[in-house]
Image (tube, grey):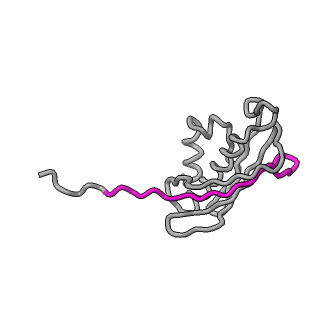
Amino acid sequence: MGILDKMVAEGNGKFWGFLGCRFIKGDGEEVQIALTAGEHHTNSMGIIHGGVLTSLMDQAMGMVATAAMAVDSCVTTNLNVHFLAPMKQGELIVTSTILHQAGRSVTAQSEVRDASGTLGCMATATFRIARVKAQNTESQG
């Protein structure tokens, strides 16, 4: 099972599943996920809540960063979001790609479009691979 397949399989009982995300395709260069946004994803103005859109982009960028670095996980250290057009209930497609890799850091970009292709928002984020804790090899004498 690949890194992305594992993330999707384990995500149903986590925030991924709570949001209602669906995996479309992905690898270490690009990830696409989708959401059929419903009334429970809207704010008081009847448009999709900015936190939902931000979460979708953070999720997709984290997935492409994880796949690009071929690791089990990474953490978001910086996230910049630009809201460009209101998104309404219906199909949303999120596309994320890698911008830059250096050492333990990856920078990605993401966008959310509706079914008609309208660009609703875009983001960039930096992710960092957490240090692996060293095994304690000292004797317990």
Pick out the residue farthest to the right.
Answer: 116
Residue pictured at 66% horizontal, 66% vertical: 99
Q: Nearer the viewer, residue 126 or 31?
A: 126
Residue 124 x/y as whole percent? 67, 58
Horizontal side of residue 84 vs 64, given as left or right: right
Residue 81 x/y as whole percent? 70, 52
The magenta segment is 112-134
Horizontal side of residue 93 vs 102, given as left or right: right
Pick out the residue farthest to the left.
Answer: 141
Question: How many discs appear?
Answer: 0
Q: Per the image, is 20 magenta?
A: no
Horizontal side of residue 85 vs 31, given as left or right: right
Q: Nearer the viewer, residue 7 or 42?
A: 42
Residue pictured at 78% horizontal, 30% vertical: 44
Residue pictured at 57% horizontal, 63% vertical: 106
Residue 125 x/y as whole percent? 63, 57
Q: Nearer the viewer, residue 67 or 80?
A: 80
Residue 48 x/y as whole percent? 77, 38
Rendered image quadrant of residue 17: top right
Q: Per the image, is 131 magenta?
A: yes
Horizontal side of residue 137 vs 34, given as left or right: left
Q: Nearer the viewer, residue 32 or 107?
A: 107
Rendered image quadrant of residue 3: bottom right
